[in-house]
Image: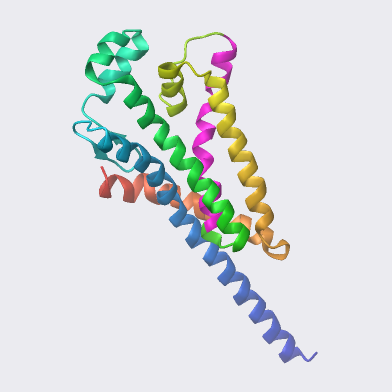
Amino acid sequence: MSSVESAIHHDVRITSTSRLAATWIGASIIAVPLGVLLHELGHFLAYRAFGFQGVALHYSSATHYVERTFWQLVYRGDTAAAASLLPPWKVGLATAAGLLFTFVVTFVCCVWAAKNPHPLAIALGIFAPVRFLSGLPTIPLVLSGKPVRAGTDEAHLAVLTGIPLLLLIFAGLLVLVLAWVWLVRRIPKDQRWISLGSMISGLALGIFFYFWLIGPRLLP
């Protein structure tokens, strides 16, 4: 191979690698707001379906008028007063709806990636269940017998339904691990390291742009 042909081949390889990295970074940036909003959309739609008053979708939450008061009463043990505000079964289903949406999004991404390992399918499937990591700090509290006041969906659902909190936490973590292993293996081996590095960089950028710049301004 002549020096000219070698230079051309080297330039093509650099261009191809750069394009691959840019595709993964772009898809991963998009995956962040999608993952967050699809989870919150589950809560939002359930609130609307049950006729809760003052329902609003924010960039990282979905709320209604008596949400804070309801949960304060529940965690104080005053379930009767909480029930006078809203039926607990409706609140429980609305809380579970966000978790269900995250499970469904993760599953759909796994199916999508099995047919076509598109960067958005893999990035969204990896980012969406990241929210299940929020239960990790709660595990030592539960094991030590200390009261849990965490504001996670799992904690809310556990206190309303009596389902063991650890069961809910470990179910989410299991989904996360299985999805991550499955999705990473869908990435072609010859592209895996550059794809993973670009995806991590894109997710970091997406978190910064969405949570600190774009999200608070679009959906305060």
Determine the residue positioned at 31% across, 8% down: 78
Q: Position of residue 166 (x, y in %)?
A: 56, 21
146 relative to 152 in the view: left or right: right
Answer whether residue 199 is visible to the viewer in this image. no
Determine the residue positioned at 55% across, 14% down: 142
Magenta-highlighted residues: 121-144
Q: Residue furthest left?
A: 54
Determine the residue positioned at 27% across, 46% down: 219
Answer whether residue 38 is visible to the viewer in this image. yes
Q: How is the image coloured?
A: rainbow
Dominant secondary structure (helix, strand or loop) of the stretch shown in magenta: helix
In the figure, 146 relative to 173: above or below? above
Determine the residue positioned at 62% across, 46% down: 180
Q: Position of residue 104 (x, y in %)?
A: 49, 45
In the figure, 79 relative to 201: above or below? above
Q: Position of residue 212 (x, y in %)?
A: 36, 45
The one nearer the camera, 151 or 160, is 160
